[in-house]
């Protein structure tokens, strides 16, 4: 009788979007750590045996679809709407000159509408709150994506996830701003090098301004992907020591930038020191999401989760005080604390989160929506408010509908195709190397 070998393997999770903010911006279980004590039970849906006949190639992994992290998926929709409200209500009126310069449009006249008071509280701002939620979701889900990829295929899949949709959205926005400049007879504000560096997401490294006003979060995401790939094995194992090392290295970069190691320090976004300081700062915050991932996979207990969140949160606050954003302390960091509070509360009750068709639909288009909402939204608002004299609440509804329609088109065309390519890479990676490990999990995992 032929002998057969049995090998259990981890479950594949569907790859989510980024946000930025981001992704950018745009979300697999980690390896088993052997223990001398009684091993934890692996749920049937998390590990299924595969039969390998002697002398044959490794089997193709069997695709399964575990329960989605509903709370994280719905939070993407919440975060996208929060950032849009901050920009289309707050920035549009409170920073009129800035919005006009970015879109090659005139500054609108008139008093601030009452809605502005809802988004301009001195201790709470929907913009950084939404970005904080996006960063935590990325930290939570990136180890899952890494679990089914090699380092190289992981990075390639993330580039495919971000760049096609982002570049398409950016070129649309550049076309809209160019049309604005012709309609309003104003100079086009961006040169060829500015457009190219923004397309490549290196504008922060070469001293060029951001065009869409949100792609700085995608720059943070890209640096985070590189860091995660460099310590892939440790992340798959759920190593808290590795996270501590990354966090301390990021804090060291913040301190070095403040000391002038990367050029003159300051709050100007075109400075290299600003890019190093802020991106390192937010990587510390994203690591909090990775700690939640470790707990979700059963790699650490609740006490380690709470301790890790507290330690990284304290380090994040300390880094903020010496970063290029120190002038925003403590007001803006409090919004990230609020984002963490909401994220943690929903994580605690994740098994009881009901379906919400509105938030699920918003989550599906959240990445392209996040990318185009600012410049396209400002431009539509200027036409409705300044040219056609439409009341601001009705004009805001029209601008949001226009952005939703454009984001849906980008999702159905560019984004969906890039996601399929990423899934194909994941399958190819598993076929070549097999799943990296069985997830060490408990009954609380993936609820």
Image (cartoon, rainbow, N blue to C red):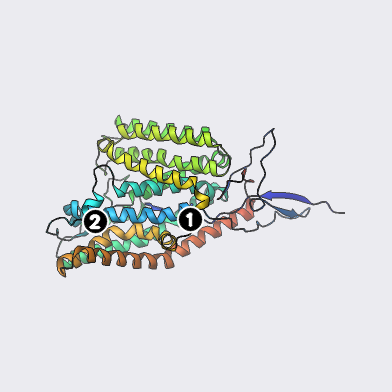
Q: Are marks 2 and 1 in contact (CB under 8 Å)?
A: no
Q: Is residue 212 visible?
A: no
Residue 396 visible to the viewer: yes
Toward the right, the furthest residue is: 1
Above or below, comparing residue 438 to residue 389 in the picture: above
Q: Earlier in the sequence, mark 2 or mark 1?
A: 1
Tell us which disc is closer to us: 2 or 1.
2
Residue where numbered disc 2 is placed = 89
Q: How many marks?
A: 2
What x and y, as percent, mark residue 190? Answer: 23, 56
Which mark, by number, is residue 410?
none
Picture layout, residue 116 above or below residue 315: below
User: Which residue is depicted at the point 46% across and 64% down?
Assistant: 416
How many angstroms separate mark 2 from mark 1 (CA)?
28 Å
Mark 2 nearby-residue class (10 Å; few <14, some 14–19, many ≥20): many
Position of 435 compared to 189: left or right? Answer: right
Question: Picture quarter containing residue 57?
Answer: bottom right
Residue 63 drawn at (x, y percent): 62, 59
Say the numbered circle drawn on residue 16: 1
Q: Secondary structure at mark 2?
A: helix
In the rendered image, which quarter is residue 64 located in?
A: bottom right
Residue at 23% across, 53% down: 90
């Amino acid at each position: 009788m032929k002998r057969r070998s049995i090998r259990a393997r981890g479950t594949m999770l569907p790859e989510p979007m980024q946000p930025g903010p981001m992704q950018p911006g745009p979300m697999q279980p980690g390896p088993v750590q052997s223990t001398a004590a009684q091993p934890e039970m692996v749920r049937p849906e998390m590990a299924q045996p595969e039969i390998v006949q002697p002398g044959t190639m490794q089997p193709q992994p069997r695709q399964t679809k575990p329960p989605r992290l509903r709370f994280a998926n719905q939070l993407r929709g919440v975060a996208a709407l929060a950032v849009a409200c901050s920009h289309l209500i707050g920035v549009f009126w409170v920073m009129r000159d800035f919005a006009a310069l970015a879109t090659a449009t005139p500054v609108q006249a008139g008093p601030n509408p009452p809605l502005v008071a809802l988004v301009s509280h001195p201790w709470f701002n929907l913009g950084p709150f939404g970005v904080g939620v996006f960063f935590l979701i990325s930290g939570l889900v990136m180890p899952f994506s890494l679990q089914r990829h090699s380092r190289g295929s992981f990075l390639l899949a993330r580039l495919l996830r971000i760049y096609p949709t982002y570049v398409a959205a950016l070129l649309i926005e550049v076309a809209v701003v160019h049309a604005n400049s012709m309609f309003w007879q104003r100079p086009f504000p961006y040169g060829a090098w500015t457009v190219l560096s923004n397309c490549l997401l290196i504008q922060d490294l070469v001293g060029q301004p951001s065009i869409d006003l949100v792609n700085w979060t995608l720059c943070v995401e890209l640096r985070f992907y590189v860091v995660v790939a460099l310590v892939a094995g440790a992340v798959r194992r759920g190593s808290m020591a590795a996270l501590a090392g990354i966090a301390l290295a990021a804090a060291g970069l913040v301190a070095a930038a403040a000391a002038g190691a990367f050029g003159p320090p300051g709050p100007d976004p075109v400075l290299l020191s600003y890019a190093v300081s802020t991106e390192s700062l937010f990587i510390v915050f994203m690591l909090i999401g990775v700690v939640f991932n470790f707990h979700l996979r059963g790699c650490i207990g609740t006490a380690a989760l709470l301790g890790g969140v507290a330690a990284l949160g304290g380090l994040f606050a300390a880094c903020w005080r010496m970063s290029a954003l120190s002038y925003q302390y403590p007001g803006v960091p409090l919004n990230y604390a609020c984002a963490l509070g909401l994220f943690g509360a929903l994580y605690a009750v994740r098994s009881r989160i009901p379906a919400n068709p509105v938030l699920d639909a918003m989550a599906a288009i959240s990445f392209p929506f996040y990318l185009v909402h600012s410049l396209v939204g400002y431009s539509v608002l200027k036409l409705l408010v300044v040219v056609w004299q439409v009341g601001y609440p009705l004009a805001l509804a029209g601008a949001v509908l226009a952005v939703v329609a454009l984001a849906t088109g980008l999702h159905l065309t560019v984004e969906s195709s890039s996601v399929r390519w990423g899934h194909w890479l994941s399958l190819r990676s598993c076929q070549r190397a097999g799943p990296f490990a069985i997830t060490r999990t408990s009954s609380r995992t993936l609820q």
